[in-house]
Amino acid sequence: MANKEAPINVAIGGLGYISGGITLLLTEEQYRINKYLKQPFEIKQIFVKDIDGSTGLPNAAEINADRRAGILKSGEYWPAPSEERKIKAKGDCIEINGKLIELVRGDIRDEGSIGRRINPEIEVFFEGSGILDKVEKVKKALKGVKTKKGLIYLATYVVKDGDDGSTMPIYIEGITEQGYKPTEIKDSGDTEVVDAGSNISCTGKAGGEIVHVVIEAVAKITGVKKPTMVKSNAVHGDTPSQELHAKPSIKDPRKSRRAPDSIIPGKTNAKEGFAKLFAGVEFFSVFPSYRVDEKDGSFVDMYFFYPSGTKITAREIKDAFIKEAEEKSHVVAYTEDEITSEDIRQSTKAVVVDGSRIEVVHTPVGEVIYVPGAYAHAHGPEAQVIYVAQSMEQAKRQTQWYKDKFTSSDSGAFALQALDGGSSLYLPQK
């Protein structure tokens, strides 16, 4: 195998909503995201809190995403062979779709929980459980990590800042303001170097891509650098926080109701991520979200408020999204056909922009740009975080210390490439 095809060794925290989906994508050889992968991913370990003594498998609570991620089932939510997917216990391992993966048992919140048990060959750790939601928790779990090639720790959600002001950068393709710079490793043995970053929610990915394109397009065409305010509304399909079937909950009785019988108002956590991604842009304080009876399709409406006299047309906004979809086809899709949630189920894009409904409205107090987007909340987030990890690993592999230690004289093999001809993933667009 050529150096540029060397597998990326992966560990995954949990088998839940997002982590279960990542596991599925990386164990299906024929799945469609493979055309965007420059190197194969190889899952070496899955960290779980508890294992059922009678089956040798993670307990039911830890695979609650089988309905959504399709790890145990086929057909309804994911493209799949006609036969059911199988999970089998084999000693200290779990077999998923024919892939043998080591099960690592223990509470990931314990000090050194990852550091004590991680395989030294691991290069990327996907944390998908949502448990390590604050910087201090991440540091505690990673204490004592030693790997051969340096570890990229990537949370699949926004990690809250630490009490001491420490923060984890958000890495999202093409829109983050902080470029990933791999830490240089000097020694020749195992290293304690960990580069940690976080991602953002499915609504945040979809809305963030829209924010990125609109702000850049308006700035380029009109010279107005940023809107006076951005507002968002989301209509979200069912997730573990609101199921299709009744699920008793003392903590939140509202969410115990069946989704088909009750539209439940709430709010997204996208604003927190947006504030980090787009410094200086004012986002409306509440981002409402409504849960509805939908298996895998969600919508986000983004409203941009600009000063009066900002001369921009709907056609110019549409053209900006057409260009973005051409350059980053693995992230953005654009259509001028009227779409419904059924049309975007199983999409692995961050967002599908509905150009038929883009509008620019002139009001007495300013200009309002309206852009609607759709996304498959059970598919897009998993695929997008895999692309992010791939690009971060490519950036690491092009550093001189990595090429000197782990590659042959063909040092150009890991030159950082944008996926599918797109723009550089972590450098802010000027």
Image (tube, rainbow, N blue to C red):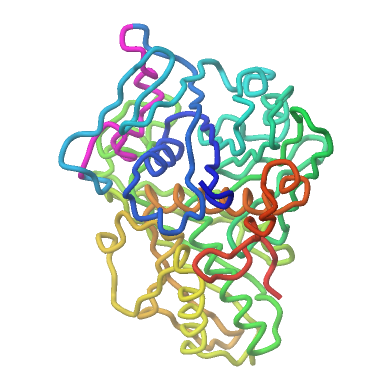
User: Residue 218, image x and y in percent?
Assistant: 62, 83
- The relative height of residue 382 versus residue 48 in the rendered view (above or below) is below
Give yes or no for residue 74 being in the magenta stretch.
yes
The answer to which image quadrant residue 215 occupies is bottom right
Left or right: residue 150 versus residue 2 is right
The magenta stretch spans which residues?
54-75
Q: 387 or 412, which lies in front?
A: 412
- The relative height of residue 371 versus residue 391 in the rendered view (above or below) is below
The answer to which image quadrant residue 56 occupies is top left
Q: 422 or 78, which lies in front?
A: 422
Q: How many marks?
A: 0
Give yes or no for residue 329 being in the magenta stretch.
no
Residue at 44%, 63% (x, y): give it. 351
Q: 2 or 172, which lies in front?
A: 2
Which residue appears farthest toward the left when viewing the image? 82
Which residue appears farthest toward the top when viewing the image? 53
- The relative height of residue 36 versus residue 260 in the rendered view (above or below) is below
Residue at 41%, 14% (x, y): give it. 51
- The relative height of residue 367 versus residue 145 in the rendered view (above or below) is below
User: Residue 307, image x and y in percent?
Assistant: 66, 84
User: Residue 387, image x and y in percent?
Assistant: 52, 53
Left or right: residue 387 versus residue 146 is left
Residue at 55%, 37% (x, y): give it. 9
Left or right: residue 352 versus residue 97 is right
The C terminus lies in which quarter of the figure?
A: bottom right
Predominant SS along the magenta part: loop
User: Residue 152, image x and y in percent?
Assistant: 65, 40
Q: 370 or 126, which lies in front?
A: 126
Which residue appears farthest toward the front when viewing the image? 409
